[in-house]
Amino acid sequence: MLSITSKHPAFQFAVSLTKRTTRTESGKFLLETASFVGQALRSSTHIDSVFVVDGVPDTIPQLSRERDVPLYVVSRGLMQKLVGTSYDTDVTALAVAHKVEATAEQIVEAGGLLLVGESIQDPRNVGVLIRTAEAAGCTAIALSSDSAEPWCRAAARSSTGSVVRLPIHLYDDAASFILPLLRAEYTVVAGSAHAPESALTTNLTGRPMAILVGNETTGLRPETAQMASRFVSLPMKKGGPSSLNVTVAAGILLYLTLTTE
């Protein structure tokens, strides 16, 4: 372990990753909390460096040594600067991690189960979708490029570590991404509160399959929903809410595909 100041090049690069432009250009992001850093060090995720403060669990230095990852000790003030908040933080460990990405071609070839999100604006929802997709056994998650960035702080934290394991693909155009899935014989299931067919009575068996969910307020764009093989809704209590949170709806749809296999 090496104690460093704010002038150290490794620290300066880590601080630059609090900006999206640097994350995009470098293909790296900041992963915080001892739990998630430990998960990353135990996985195949490539980690460039780890920063810790006094009080970090002994497992972090041990795992860093086993992976031959540079470990830097910083003050709590410097850790707060890395986290990018204006208030005191209880984060004791943070890592510079490489993004786990997938191309559209890799997703088509992988088959299996895929979650696709369109215009998901809340980064916390993006993080929970990543977490849910991994839990349900998805081979990847695809998000439209106008969604909240999956590697920002709020999304990465909400993924509870899944962001370092589940491949993520960002697509610019829904048609250009979905049409190859259809040609590869994916069953594309679009979820919407306005769909006439209930997901509970729809046969969601078979692979490969893609589950499509849309924006928190407006749902899927009509032209995106029209490309789907199936257009399904989840039944709602009369007089109650008009829809479910996108993360809840996605979780139900994904698990329905598991229970009907």
Image (cartoon, rainbow, N blue to C red):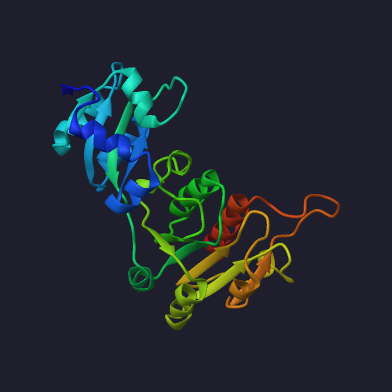
**149 left or right of 55 in image:** right
Which image quadrant is residue 67 in?
top left
Q: Position of residue 210 (x, y in %)?
A: 50, 68
**219 left or right of 98 in image:** right
Q: Position of residue 27 (x, y in %)?
A: 29, 52
Q: Position of residue 212 (x, y in %)?
A: 56, 65
Classify 11 as above or below 150: above
Q: Is residue 54 visible?
A: yes
Q: Is residue 261 visible?
A: no
Q: Identify the residue at horizontal 68%, vertical 52% (top origin).
A: 244
Question: How many callouts does the rendering have?
Answer: 0
Q: Identify the residue at horizontal 54%, vertical 59% (top origin).
A: 254
Which image quadrant is residue 119 in?
bottom right
Classify 149 as above or below 229: above
Q: Position of residue 44 (x, y in %)?
A: 24, 48
Along the viewing direction, whichever of 220 and 146 lies nearer the viewer: 146
Classify 83 as above or below 208: above
Along the viewing direction, whichever of 173 and 199 lies nearer the viewer: 173
Q: Identify the residue at horizontal 34%, vertical 39% (top origin).
A: 30
